Image (spheres, helix red, strand yellow):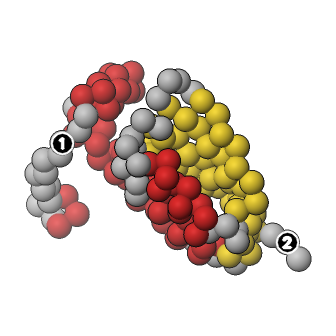
Amino acid sequence: MTKDNELSRIGISLPKHLLDKFDDIINLRGYSSRSEGIRDAIRSYITYYKWMSDVHGERQGVITMIYDHEQRGLLTLLTDIQHEFMGIIQATIHSHITHSQCLEVVLVRGEGEDLKKLAERLMAQKGVESVKLTTIPIAD
């Protein structure tokens, strides 16, 4: 077996509801196993990371974030992070999805590296379920 085809075994812990959703997707998409689904998800994550690595220069964009507002301390932490980046945040929109889930849309403008830093800081917080940064370059 070559290095590219060499398999490594890992173990992960997931909340039951997340695993149940993942299993539903695996069944709908016709994967033969969870391992196939996880490999596909990791490939997508790597592709997205590479795409985000190419965000540079002056940019206009939007960060969409879904989070659990019942996560202890999360709202204060998200607010503190946004205050740290107030120089690039133009506006935010908050919407309630369910009793515990919220959607927040953050309009941003600034250096691409700073936009990525903000998105990555938000993404790393416990209780944040999803963060997506979408940007376009600002033409002169």
Residue 109 in percent (x, y) is at: 74, 66
* Nearer-the-camera pick, 49 or 80: 80
| In this view, 22 is above or below 123 | above
Q: Quadrant of the C terminus?
A: bottom right
* Nearer-the-camera pick, 25 or 65: 65
| In this view, 111 is above or below 41 | below
* Nearer-the-camera pick, 22 or 13: 13
State the residue lying farthest toward the right. Answer: 140
2 or 1: tag closer to the N-terminus: 1
Residue 19 in percent (x, y) is at: 27, 31
Secondary structure found at label 1: loop
Identified by mark 1, the residue type is Ser
In this picture, residue 115 sits left or right of residue 60:
left
The residue wearing badge 2 is 139
| In this view, 52 is above or below 65 | below
Mark 2 or 1: the one toward you:
1
Q: Is any part of residue 63 visible from this angle?
A: yes
Confirm or deny contact between disc 2 and disc 1 (CB under 8 A). no
Residue 128 in percent (x, y) is at: 44, 46
Give neighbour class at mark 2: few <14, some 14-19, many 20+ (Cα, 10 Å).
few
In this picture, residue 3 sits left or right of residue 132:
left
In this picture, residue 45 sits left or right of residue 57:
left
Q: Residue at x 19, y 58 (%)?
A: 5
Q: Residue at x 49, y 52 (%)?
A: 76
Q: Is any part of residue 115 visible from this angle?
A: no
Identified by mark 2, the residue type is Ala
Gap between marks 2 and 1 measured at Cα:
45 Å
The residue wearing badge 1 is 13
Q: Residue at x 62, y 68 (%)?
A: 85
Residue 10 in percent (x, y) is at: 13, 51
